[in-house]
């Protein structure tokens, strides 16, 4: 079933005869001196889920952008259903049955789901008949593939997972037979990711072809049939997923053995460095999002905040960092209350010894039109002079050191930050904040969109800061990351801290239920998390009681 598809007749009549949905032969692409794709060969079988993995800057997104018509290859051939094609733009790609769901969704926030789906695919000058036909087709697509979403809902009111369904519906409505998904679970909860995989399974069962770009090897092993590994612009190897392992894939991606787990010794908490008491924070519409919460973070420990996106984590971090005024409560660093109100709150927080890696690197962490060296000193310009007295040589030398230490690629000080991959943008922000030797580091989504080699490096840097006696507050949508890095876990739901958990015993399923308010104990609120021993915290006690070990009488982990 398809929606408007005016160029459907352009699709190869030999489709049924070809076992390959997509074939890329000898693809090369340069961006100036950078050879982004080097003689790439890729064959994707029809009706399969084909994974593509590689480090940031390996050329994955460039390759898929060529297939989708965003870029034109310098040389090589694209074959769709066995027929050579010159794909000129994304509309042409859609006409050939190729759709793409981007990591950052391309939706109009104040349009309805229905309006977003038909936007650019109207089949007459009269919009009402188009919308009526589209409504019927969306109902059928939702029923067939489990893509339930209210067609009249306004996109900005939908969860991230629902917005992603809208993007998939857009592609299917336009007749996509091959669907490219770029880091599709980067901002999804575990439950939303599971639902996405069920959708992909149904699409595969219906004969659709899925190309999945992800850095999460667990997802590759769970859903793909074949996986191709790219490294430094070249295709290294394609394997049957059943015949490989996460360790082998990681080694192929990075070119060396990669530790897939966080190695850290026990924490040795010292004095309280971050003390949050009775904090109340509102959003831009003056709606309370952080609701009278209190906790402490001590020197030499990592405290993780687990919660579904939109439950107050962003407002909490922004308030502590001095970027958002608090309605009530106090924040102290090193025993000194911070006055964070006003436009210079963030600067005063930095002077007090607090560094901040924001959740949204593009909106709050970088000025994308600035060069790499400028972003590497952003917020700390006073260390290099001011205005016409800025010591540019010193600033550039510092930036060069940061880029080298954090393996930013390319290590080009004069490249605009907008031209780095997302993972390398993230490393610029992390280097700037972590290398300032703060007493307190608050970090949101430290490895969002970052490849496996860089994840290992970033995790090690965070552990080193903890072991050096720093206090670290960590927010991440990745439960694996929260559980492996944290020494204590606080669970945030609807702006309330609903409990504290020990990562050694906290089960991912139970944490997921707490994060969504579905756990019976999530109605209990711990008023002073971080000030009680873990065994005295009601939610932690519930997690221990409900762990596999306690349910079966033996440890099943």
Image: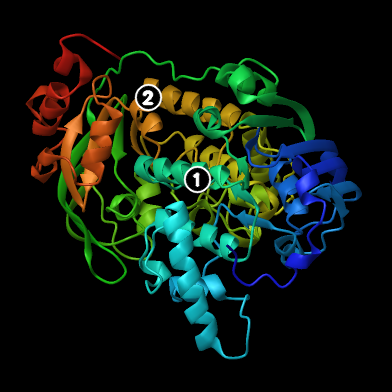
Looking at the rendered structure, which numbered label has been put on residue 236? none
Looking at the rendered structure, the secondary structure element under dot 1 is helix
- Looking at the image, which residue is at 57% across and 29% down? 452
Residue 367 rendering spot, x and y as whole percentages: 58, 58
Residue that sits furthest to the right in the current view: 75
Q: Quadrant of the N terminus?
A: bottom right
Q: Name the residue: 78% across, 31% down.
A: 235
Give the left or right position of residue 279, taking residue 190 as reference: left
Residue 550 appears in view:
yes
Q: Position of residue 531 (x, y in %)?
A: 12, 32
Work out whether 31 lies above or below 163. above
Q: Quadrant of residue 258?
A: top right
Query: Label 1 to label 2, Cα distance in Å?
Result: 32 Å
Q: Position of residue 429 (x, y in %)?
A: 54, 44
* Front label number (1 vs 2): 1
- Up the image or down, 431 lies above or below 555; here it is below
Mark 1 residue crowding within 10 angstroms, few (<14) / some (14–19) / many (20+): some
Extreme-top residue of the structure: 554
Whichever of callouts 1 and 2 sits on the residue coming sooner in the sequence is: 1
Question: In the depicted view, which residue is nearer to us: 151 or 401?
Answer: 151
Residue extending furthest bottom? 126
In the rendered image, the quadrant that contains the C terminus is: top left
Q: Residue 420 in the image: state x and y as whole percent.
A: 67, 48
Residue of label 1 = 202
Decide if residue 31 is in sight here.
no
Residue behind mark 2? 484
């Amino acid at each position: 079933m398809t929606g408007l598809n005016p160029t459907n007749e352009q699709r190869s009549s030999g489709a049924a005869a070809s076992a390959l949905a997509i074939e890329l032969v000898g693809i090369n692409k340069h961006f100036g001196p950078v050879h982004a794709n080097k003689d790439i060969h890729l064959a994707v079988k029809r009706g399969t889920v084909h994974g593509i993995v590689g480090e940031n800057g390996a050329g994955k997104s460039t390759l898929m952008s060529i297939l989708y018509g965003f870029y034109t290859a310098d040389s090589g051939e694209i074959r769709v259903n066995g027929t050579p094609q010159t794909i000129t733009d994304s509309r042409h790609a859609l006409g050939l049955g190729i759709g793409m769901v981007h990591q950052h969704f391309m939706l109009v926030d104040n349009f309805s789901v229905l309006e977003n789906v038909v936007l650019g695919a109207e089949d007459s000058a009269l919009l009402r008949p188009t919308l009526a036909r589209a409504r019927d087709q969306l109902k059928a697509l939702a029923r067939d593939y489990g893509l339930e979403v209210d067609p009249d809902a306004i996109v900005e009111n939908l969860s991230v997972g629902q917005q992603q369904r809208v993007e998939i519906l857009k592609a299917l409505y336009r007749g996509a037979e091959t669907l490219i998904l770029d880091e599709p679970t980067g901002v999804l909860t575990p439950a939303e990711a599971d639902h996405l995989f069920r959708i992909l399974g149904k699409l595969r069962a219906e004969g659709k072809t899925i190309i999945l770009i992800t850095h999460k090897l667990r997802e590759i092993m769970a859903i793909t049939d074949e996986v191709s590994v790219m490294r430094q612009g070249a295709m290294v190897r394609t394997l049957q997923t059943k015949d490989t392992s996460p360790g082998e894939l990681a080694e192929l991606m990075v070119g060396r053995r990669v530790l897939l787990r966080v190695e850290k010794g026990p924490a040795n908490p010292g004095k309280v460095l971050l003390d949050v008491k009775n904090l109340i924070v509102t959003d831009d519409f003056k709606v309370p999002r952080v609701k009278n919460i209190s906790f402490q973070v001590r020197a030499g420990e990592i405290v993780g905040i687990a919660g579904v996106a939109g439950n107050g984590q962003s407002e909490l971090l922004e308030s502590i960092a001095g970027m958002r005024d608090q309605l009530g409560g106090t924040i102290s660093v090193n025993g000194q209350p911070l006055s964070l109100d006003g436009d210079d709150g963030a600067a005063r927080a930095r002077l007090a010894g607090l560094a901040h890696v924001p959740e949204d690197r593009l909106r709050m962490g970088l000025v994308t039109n600035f060069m790499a060296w400028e972003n590497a000193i952003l917020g700390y310009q006073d260390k290099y002079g001011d205005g016409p007295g800025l010591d540019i040589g010193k600033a550039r030398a510092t930036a060069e050191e940061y880029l080298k230490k954090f393996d930013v690629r390319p290590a080009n000080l004069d490249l605009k930050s907008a031209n780095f991959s997302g993972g390398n943008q993230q490393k610029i922000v992390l280097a700037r904040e972590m290398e300032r030797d703060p007493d307190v580091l608050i970090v949101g989504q430290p490895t969002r969109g970052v490849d496996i080699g860089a994840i290992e490096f970033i995790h090690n840097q965070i552990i080193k800061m903890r072991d050096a006696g720093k206090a670290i507050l960590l927010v991440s949508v990745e439960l694996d990351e929260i559980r492996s890095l944290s020494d204590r876990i606080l669970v945030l739901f609807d702006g309330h801290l609903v409990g504290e958990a020990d990562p050694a015993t906290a089960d991912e399923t139970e944490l997921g239920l707490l994060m969504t308010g579905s756990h019976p104990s999530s109605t209990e609120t711990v008023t002073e998390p971080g000030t009680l021993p873990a065994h005295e915290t009601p939610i932690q006690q519930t997690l221990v009681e409900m762990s596999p070990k306690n349910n079966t009488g033996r440890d099943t982990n």
